[in-house]
Amino acid sequence: MTSPTSQEIAEAAALLRAGELVAFPTETVYGLGADAENPAALAKIFAAKGRPADHPLIIHLPGIEHLSRWARDIPGTALALADAFWPGPLTLILERTAIVPDAVTGGQSTVGLRVPDHPVALALLSAFGGGIAAPSANRYGRISPTTAGHVRDELGDRVSMVLDGGACEIGIESTILDLSRGSPVLLRPGAIGAERIAVVCGQAPALPASQQRQPAPRVSGSHSAHYAPTTPLRIVASDRLHDYLDAQQHAGLCCAVLARSRATPAGSPHRWRMMSSDPVGYAHDLYAVMRDFDAASVKLIVVEAPPGGEGWQAVADRLQRASAGSGMDADDDRL
Ligand code: TXA
Ligand code: MG
């Protein structure tokens, strides 16, 4: 695996201390990091991403023992979940302490916290010694980066240093669980599914906010324009896929296809990508494939609909958001 030297890690920690931005790999996606206690550094995150100031950031911690510095009134379920899943792809939303700058939370009384499960992220966090605020290292509304190259392409010299840890193992963003409302609410599905959370909490989390038709989403990622490639994207049921693509062909449109079970028909003009038939492999490749298709300047990305079921929830969620963000399904507000 690609890995920065200990000297590069020390340099990155020094840059963070000096109020600069450092992009780093996590097991989910690359993060754009800044000292979570330095408002001037936090402002640079919003400027580099082009992200509105009221969209809160996740703080990454070196270990569970740092939790009480950033969160108060921590419920027992939070400790049990942190114990079970940290380091790992689970972000917990908790009541914040006075130490947390308003710039991190967008003025909300809660803060998102997680300990990432990646050797480079953990080495950086321990060298830095404190909390690192880090959204995904993409421009606002775009696909999260899963390689250092994606970060450089998108942010260029807006970031002082990019630590290269190779391709991210999971490939989609962490599960976000809100524990500040009495009972757990799943704000964003991810690699840690609702069933595993329920086993630890003793109760199933409520549905993602995005499926509850809430008027004002608290998670910026639940806005429809999020997680979208620049190319329009349409999700089509497996049994309609070939007919749909034939119709596109007749209309003279060459599409990029994310297939899962249907093979390329003979003589198809479309660019066909066979995705993994299991959700873990699918998630791992999804954003990189969307980036490839964006770069290939096709007119339309056609995705064979994922199967139902808990294991596919996070992938289905990201595909729905991508199709809504593309404007193809502007009237589809199921998100
Ligand atoms: O896997 C991940 O979570 C990656 C890596 C870098 O850790 N980070 C990430 O950050 O996806 P970001 O900012 O792109 O998405 C975090 C989401 C945002 O949609 C934000 O609105 C939400 O978490 N969030 C953060 N703090 C929150 C809070 N206090 N209440 C509700 N949502 C919050
Ligand atoms: Mg993001």
Image (tube, helix red, strand yellow):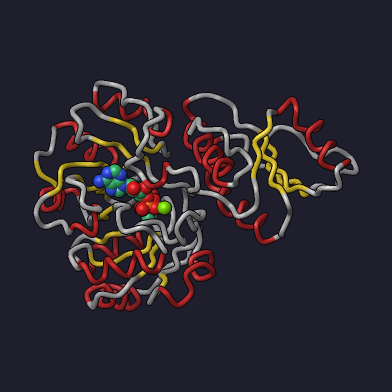
Quick check: 224 left or right of 118? right
- Residue in front for this viewpoint, 53 or 130: 53
Is there any visible trace of residue 63 in the rendered image? yes
Please determine whether, in this image, residue 5 is positioned above or below residue 316: below
Q: Position of residue 143 (x, y in %)?
A: 51, 54
Quick check: 68 left or right of 55? left
Q: How many numbered discs, if any?
A: 0
Q: Residue furthest top?
A: 203
- Residue in front for this viewpoint, 280 or 156: 156
The residue lying at 45 percent from left, 77 percent from top is 157
**Quarter of the figure with residue 40:** bottom left
Q: Position of residue 150 (x, y in %)?
A: 53, 64
The residue lying at 49 percent from left, 36 percent from top is 317
**Quarter of the figure with residue 127:** bottom left
Q: Residue furthest right?
A: 267
Is there any visible trace of residue 91 in the rendered image? no
Please determine whether, in this image, residue 56 is positioned above or below residue 263: below
The residue lying at 24 percent from left, 42 percent from top is 93
Please determine whether, in this image, residue 79 is positioned above or below residue 54: above
Q: Position of residue 170 (x, y in %)?
A: 46, 47
The residue lying at 19 percent from left, 68 percent from top is 38
- Residue in front for this viewpoint, 43 or 260: 43
Quick check: 105 left or right of 288? left
Please determine whether, in this image, residue 185 is positioned above or below residue 40: above
Q: Position of residue 70 (x, y in %)?
A: 14, 52
